[in-house]
Image (spheres, helix red, strand yellow):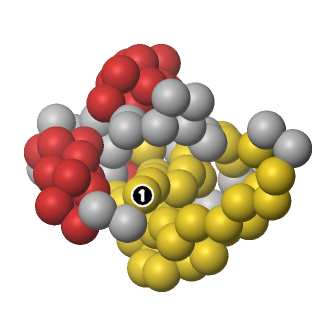
Amino acid sequence: MIVALTTFPNDGRKLKNFIQWLIRSWMVTCVNRVNYVKSYYMREGKLKSEQEKILLIKLPKENKDKFSAFFKKNHPYEIPELLFFSPEDVDKAYLERVLAKK
């Protein structure tokens, strides 16, 4: 199992469609959406800020390449943030549920 972390613009309809497609495709097993975070960053020498949403996405390792391709093609940012984490310790019952296709 791996966990992907990303941010998404504050556009509820597009985000809802994006999440629903990921879940219905069986590509990912769970998406947690954290609303209304304020992101600060430097762009073209200027301090910028934007209201965004954070997504924590759980998926089987074998889906990483397929997920990454879909993500990059369908995310609204030109270069979206996409960080992967591979937890060393995952509760066995939860891991079995994540990897089961029901």
Residue pictured at 44% horizontal, 55% vertical: 8
Mark 1 residue element: strand
* Nearer to us in this view, 7 or 78: 78
Q: Is residue 75 above or below residue 86?
A: above
Q: Position of residue 21 (x, y in %)?
A: 16, 43
Q: Callout 1: 10 Å neighbours few (<14), some, many (20+)?
A: some
Residue type pointed to by label 1: Pro
Please identify the residue farthest to the bottom as the structure is shown: 36
Q: Position of residue 45 (x, y in %)?
A: 87, 44
Residue 69 sits in which quadrant? top left
Residue 37 sits in which quadrant? bottom right
* Nearer to us in this view, 60 or 39: 39
Residue pictured at 23% horizontal, 47% vertical: 18
Q: Position of residue 58 (x, y in %)?
A: 46, 52
* Nearer to us in this view, 51 or 20: 51
Q: Read off the residue under disc 1.
A: 9
Residue pictured at 23% horizontal, 67% vertical: 12
Q: Does residue 56 appear in this view?
A: no
- In the picture, measured across the screen, residue 72 lies left or right of residue 92, that is left
Residue pictured at 47% horizontal, 18% vertical: 65
